Image: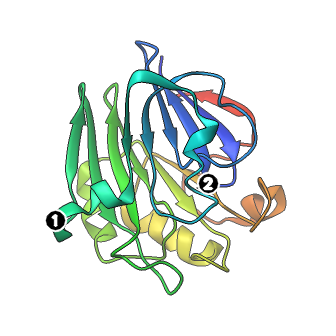
Amino acid sequence: MAKLYYQGHGSYRFTLNDNRVIYFDPYASDGYDLPADLILVTHGHDDHNQIQLVTQKPNCRVITYEDALAGGKHNSFDVDGIAIEAVTAKNLMHNPKHCVGYSLSLDGVKFYCSGDTSKTEQMSEFAARGLDYAIFCGDGKFNMGLKEAAECARIIGAKHNIIVHLKPSALFDREKAEKWDAPNKLIIEPQQEIEL
């Protein structure tokens, strides 16, 4: 069964049924011991793009926000059967021309990974996708706060909603996560792994 390991802040790792490994916005904590098949980076801020932390397999694919926005549009990718679509991410601190989120299908499990953003118009389209998991930021300083993130969760309607990126310069804030009033909330602590 595929797994999600949360490193903390906005960093997490997927391990697929065939043991392929995907890292999302490497930066925080540990959990970089498994060599990567794929690395996804949402934007260029230092707390999201520490690719050097990850040991890469010889054929590892790195998709950055620059790749995702090449040609002035949001691009889609198929990496050995892993479907990836770049989606809009933006707010006052994050220019949509230099920042993305990702929609993924991994072993038949559908994800929305917000990256750093506030509510976007595109989110209204996601409910039709029947997402299994949506992962939202919610620090309220560089991104949307808990109230807006809960509103986004209601708009998107995923089966499970996860909050990350809760406190600048910290791995996690359990108290804030508990206060997040989102439907189908799933709280994951740093260094915790769940089966998907």
Residue 144's x, y, as percent? 57, 77
Please tell me whether residue 135 is drawn above or below residue 54 in the rendered image. Answer: below
Residue wearing tag 1? 71
Residue wearing tag 2? 10
Please tell me whether residue 82 is drawn above or below residue 35 in the rendered image. Answer: below
**Quick one: 105 or 169, which is closer to the camera?**
169
Please tell me whether residue 152 is drawn above or below residue 57 in the rendered image. Answer: below
The residue located at (70%, 64%) in the rendering is: 166
Q: Is residue 38 left or right of residue 170?
A: left
The residue located at (38%, 63%) in the rendering is: 100
Q: Secondary structure at mark 1?
A: helix
**Quick one: 162 or 17, which is closer to the camera?**
17
Q: Residues within 10 Å of mark 2 (few under 14, many from 20)?
A: many
Residue 82: image quadrant is top left
Residue 47: image quadrant is bottom right
What type is the residue that disc 1 sits on? Gly
Residue 48's x, y, as percent? 57, 56
Residue 139's x, y, as percent? 68, 71
Task: Measure the alpha-carbon separation of dots 2 and 1.
Answer: 27 Å
Residue 180: image quadrant is bottom right
Which residue ends up furthest to the bottom in the rendered image?
Answer: 92
